[in-house]
Amino acid sequence: MPLLALSLAAVFTICGDAPRQTCVVDGDTIWLAGEKVRIADINAPETAQAACPAERVRGEAARARLLALLNSGSFILENGPRSHDRYGRRLATLTRDGQSLGSILVAEGLAEPWRGKRSDWCALLAAEALRR
Protein backbone atom coordinates (compact mmCIF):
# COMPACT_ATOMS: atom_id res chain seq x y z
CA MET A 1 0.00 0.00 0.00
CA PRO A 2 1.58 3.32 -1.04
CA LEU A 3 2.15 5.97 1.57
CA LEU A 4 0.86 8.64 -0.80
CA ALA A 5 -0.69 8.54 -4.27
CA LEU A 6 -1.41 11.61 -6.38
CA SER A 7 -3.21 11.70 -9.72
CA LEU A 8 -1.43 14.13 -12.00
CA ALA A 9 -1.41 15.46 -15.52
CA ALA A 10 1.29 17.80 -16.77
CA VAL A 11 3.10 18.79 -19.94
CA PHE A 12 6.68 17.53 -19.86
CA THR A 13 9.67 18.60 -21.93
CA ILE A 14 13.24 17.32 -22.08
CA CYS A 15 15.23 18.98 -19.29
CA GLY A 16 17.76 21.58 -20.30
CA ASP A 17 20.25 23.66 -18.33
CA ALA A 18 17.70 26.25 -17.21
CA PRO A 19 15.88 25.88 -13.91
CA ARG A 20 13.96 22.64 -14.07
CA GLN A 21 10.25 22.54 -13.35
CA THR A 22 8.45 19.75 -15.20
CA CYS A 23 10.73 17.81 -17.50
CA VAL A 24 12.40 14.46 -18.20
CA VAL A 25 16.09 14.09 -17.31
CA ASP A 26 16.51 10.50 -18.52
CA GLY A 27 14.60 7.23 -18.57
CA ASP A 28 14.26 7.02 -14.78
CA THR A 29 14.44 10.61 -13.51
CA ILE A 30 12.02 13.51 -13.95
CA TRP A 31 11.35 16.90 -12.48
CA LEU A 32 7.74 17.49 -11.46
CA ALA A 33 6.68 20.96 -10.35
CA GLY A 34 10.26 21.77 -9.35
CA GLU A 35 10.91 18.51 -7.46
CA LYS A 36 13.36 15.85 -8.69
CA VAL A 37 11.75 12.40 -8.78
CA ARG A 38 13.53 9.07 -9.32
CA ILE A 39 11.28 6.35 -10.74
CA ALA A 40 11.69 3.72 -8.05
CA ASP A 41 10.85 0.50 -9.89
CA ILE A 42 13.34 0.73 -12.78
CA ASN A 43 16.88 1.51 -13.80
CA ALA A 44 17.38 3.11 -17.21
CA PRO A 45 20.60 3.74 -19.15
CA GLU A 46 22.36 7.05 -18.59
CA THR A 47 22.37 9.84 -21.13
CA ALA A 48 24.67 12.64 -19.94
CA GLN A 49 27.06 10.32 -18.09
CA ALA A 50 26.84 7.24 -20.29
CA ALA A 51 29.86 4.95 -20.08
CA CYS A 52 29.73 4.06 -23.79
CA PRO A 53 27.98 5.23 -26.98
CA ALA A 54 25.52 2.30 -26.91
CA GLU A 55 24.38 3.27 -23.42
CA ARG A 56 23.85 6.88 -24.53
CA VAL A 57 21.76 5.78 -27.54
CA ARG A 58 19.58 3.46 -25.42
CA GLY A 59 19.32 6.12 -22.71
CA GLU A 60 18.13 8.73 -25.21
CA ALA A 61 15.52 6.28 -26.49
CA ALA A 62 14.35 5.62 -22.91
CA ARG A 63 14.12 9.36 -22.22
CA ALA A 64 12.11 9.97 -25.40
CA ARG A 65 9.72 7.10 -24.61
CA LEU A 66 9.22 8.25 -21.02
CA LEU A 67 8.46 11.75 -22.32
CA ALA A 68 5.83 10.33 -24.67
CA LEU A 69 4.29 8.19 -21.91
CA LEU A 70 4.07 11.10 -19.48
CA ASN A 71 2.53 13.41 -22.07
CA SER A 72 -0.10 10.89 -23.17
CA GLY A 73 -2.42 11.43 -20.20
CA SER A 74 -2.78 11.61 -16.47
CA PHE A 75 -0.82 9.25 -14.26
CA ILE A 76 -0.57 8.38 -10.60
CA LEU A 77 2.59 9.11 -8.65
CA GLU A 78 2.89 6.68 -5.73
CA ASN A 79 5.40 7.04 -2.94
CA GLY A 80 6.87 3.81 -1.69
CA PRO A 81 8.24 2.81 1.72
CA ARG A 82 11.36 4.98 1.20
CA SER A 83 10.50 8.57 0.37
CA HIS A 84 13.93 9.69 -0.91
CA ASP A 85 17.16 8.15 -2.18
CA ARG A 86 20.69 8.95 -1.02
CA TYR A 87 20.89 11.81 -3.54
CA GLY A 88 17.80 13.50 -2.10
CA ARG A 89 15.54 12.56 -5.00
CA ARG A 90 11.95 11.64 -4.23
CA LEU A 91 11.34 7.93 -4.93
CA ALA A 92 8.03 7.05 -6.57
CA THR A 93 6.42 4.77 -9.11
CA LEU A 94 4.33 6.19 -11.92
CA THR A 95 1.24 4.28 -13.01
CA ARG A 96 -1.60 4.68 -15.46
CA ASP A 97 -4.64 2.41 -15.47
CA GLY A 98 -2.92 0.18 -12.92
CA GLN A 99 0.21 -0.34 -15.02
CA SER A 100 3.62 0.98 -14.08
CA LEU A 101 5.07 3.29 -16.72
CA GLY A 102 8.42 1.82 -15.71
CA SER A 103 7.20 -1.68 -16.59
CA ILE A 104 6.37 -0.42 -20.08
CA LEU A 105 9.95 0.77 -20.48
CA VAL A 106 11.20 -2.61 -19.22
CA ALA A 107 8.94 -4.50 -21.65
CA GLU A 108 10.25 -2.37 -24.52
CA GLY A 109 13.90 -3.05 -23.57
CA LEU A 110 14.54 0.56 -22.54
CA ALA A 111 15.01 -0.10 -18.82
CA GLU A 112 15.41 -2.96 -16.37
CA PRO A 113 13.61 -3.67 -13.10
CA TRP A 114 15.32 -1.98 -10.14
CA ARG A 115 17.42 -4.56 -8.31
CA GLY A 116 19.03 -2.35 -5.69
CA LYS A 117 22.00 -1.31 -7.81
CA ARG A 118 22.81 -0.05 -11.27
CA SER A 119 23.80 -2.49 -13.98
CA ASP A 120 26.67 -2.15 -16.42
CA TRP A 121 24.65 -1.07 -19.44
CA CYS A 122 27.66 -1.22 -21.74
CA ALA A 123 28.20 -4.90 -20.92
CA LEU A 124 24.48 -5.67 -21.20
CA LEU A 125 24.17 -3.95 -24.56
CA ALA A 126 27.34 -5.58 -25.91
CA ALA A 127 25.97 -9.00 -24.92
CA GLU A 128 22.64 -8.12 -26.55
CA ALA A 129 24.45 -7.17 -29.78
CA LEU A 130 26.33 -10.49 -29.79
CA ARG A 131 23.05 -12.43 -29.49
CA ARG A 132 21.74 -10.82 -32.69
Image (tube, rainbow, N blue to C red):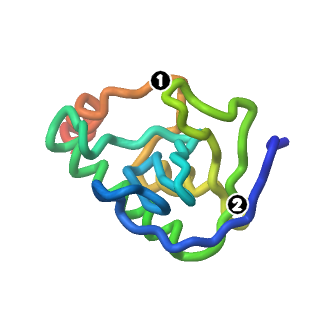
Decide if residue 5 is on the left or right side of residue 71: right
Q: In x, y percent, where is residue 36?
A: 51, 46
The amino acid type, in three-letter code, at marker 2 is Ile
Asked if residue 8 is positioned above or below residue 86 in the image, the reply reads below
Decide if residue 121 is on the left or right side of residue 41: left
> Toward the viewer: 118 or 79?
79
Residue drawn where x is 34% and y is 41% of the image: 45
CA separation, marks 2 and 1?
Answer: 25 Å
Residue at the right extreme, as displayed: 1
Mark 1 sits on what residue?
A: 117
The earlier-in-sequence mark between 2 and 1 is 2
> Toward the viewer: 125 or 94?
94
User: Dot 1, how many residues are within 10 Å of its Cα: few (below 14), some (14-19), or many (20+)?
Assistant: few
> Toward the viewer: 114 or 130?
114
Residue drawn where x is 49% and y is 62% of the image: 22
Asked if residue 44 is positioned above or below residue 13 in the image, the reply reads above
The amino acid type, in three-letter code, at marker 1 is Lys
Mark 2 sits on what residue?
A: 76
Dividing the picture into quadrants, the one containing residue 19 is bottom left
Q: In x, y percent, where is residue 128?
A: 27, 39
User: Dot 2, how many residues are within 10 Å of its Cα: few (below 14), some (14-19), or many (20+)?
Assistant: many
Dividing the picture into quadrants, the one containing residue 131 is top left
Residue drawn where x is 46% and y is 46% of the image: 28
Residue drawn where x is 35% and y is 63% of the image: 14
* Label 2: element kind: strand
